[in-house]
Image: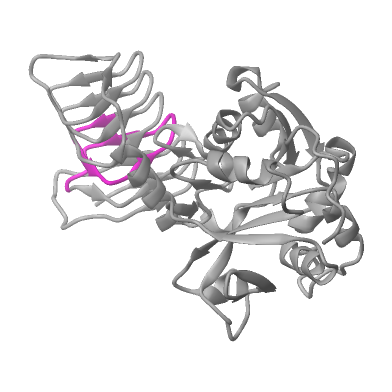
Amino acid sequence: MAEQSSPGELKGLVLAGGKGTRLRPFTYTGAKQLVPIANKPILFHAIEQLAASGITDLGIVVGDTKKQIVEAVGDGSRFGVSVTYIDQSAPLGIAHAVRIAEPFLGDSPFILFLGDNFLKEGIASYVEQFRSGEYNSLVLLSPVDDPRSFGIAELDGERLVRVIEKPAQPPSNMAVIGIYFFDANVFDAIRQIEPSPRGELEITDTIQKLIDSGCSVRADVIKDRWIDTGKHDDLLEANHLFLEDLTPALMGRHDEASQIQGRVVLEEGAEVVNSRIQGPAIIGERTRIVNSYVGPFTSIYHDCLVADTEISGSVVLENTRIEQVGHRIEHSLIGKNVELKGHERRPHGYALILGDFSKLHLP
């Protein structure tokens, strides 16, 4: 076993760079980590999970969308944490992000958290396990349907023996998820690896180097629900999962002609007029729902208008207007500053992915 770093206070390193290409056109004009899940940016869920585990000294690696991330997160005080921003000039891989964060991390053990990933029940139990100081690294695994799309672990019983990035012939269906624990030995491992054929320093190669050099690398198969929100369907699934546990709160207003059923949140300034809201659903600040139906598992962000429309199982971003759509919108992602207007004729239905600032007039 490699020498364990002196167990200083555990730090957090959150990756919030990247292009968000898998979520396009939803992320052409914004950071993928700021897309809301249950009306809260994905990145905020990650920060809150770290804070809930007692990790309050965070580094956030940022890229092209730095300005948006900094405006949203600030100094971290609203979350009870302290944030240091670390610039990554180009998306050169997860291990590259760790390498450039070495001045911030120093000799401290740390948790590496991809900003568009989360575990529904949180990370506290794994944090406590790693704090015991028995391992140089703790790697979390989850079974996946298509192991050719992930970094995949090869196990000998419960022992992790190999990690392969997107293998053509996967040795298992156990994916290395976007939440990792390391001590300072990781920096020596990164210095020994080369960029992959796609030009990135891969975290899977780093883990393999730790294994080969005799470090104690433990792998745990998680029992919780893990979601990588990098794709449209995954984002909708994450929204669904969080809304399942929604605590009702009617801070906004609704008139007597409206029906609020099930677990519904009306945020401050929200207004519901002659409409039915079927929970679980959340309506954002200053959003107006007029003569409409909002069905289960729908999140509508702040400053929106939904009028004369039915919508269900969908996510709508801020400053969007949806009016007079003739039939129900379902399983859809609709970006910010969108204008969506329908017609009196009633088509059979729509499933939509509309990027920011879209304008669509339906026939």
Looking at the rendering, the stretch of residues picked out in magenta corresponds to 306-327
Q: Is residue 244 visible?
A: yes
Residue 136 percent location from the top left of the image: 77, 54
Residue 18 to residue 322: above or below? below
The residue nearer to you, when weighing 217 against 144, is 217
The residue nearer to you, when weighing 94 against 258, is 94
Colour mapping = one colour
Q: Is residue 309 magenta?
A: yes
The residue nearer to you, when weighing 254 against 74, is 74
Residue 65 percent location from the top left of the image: 69, 40
The answer to whether residue 249 is left or right of residue 28 is: left
Q: Residue at x 85, y 48 (%)?
A: 184
Number of callouts in the render? 0
Residue 331 percent location from the top left of the image: 30, 52
Where residue 288 sits, quadrant-wise, is: top left
Q: Residue at x 52, y 39 (%)?
A: 42
Q: Residue at x 61, y 54 (%)?
A: 178
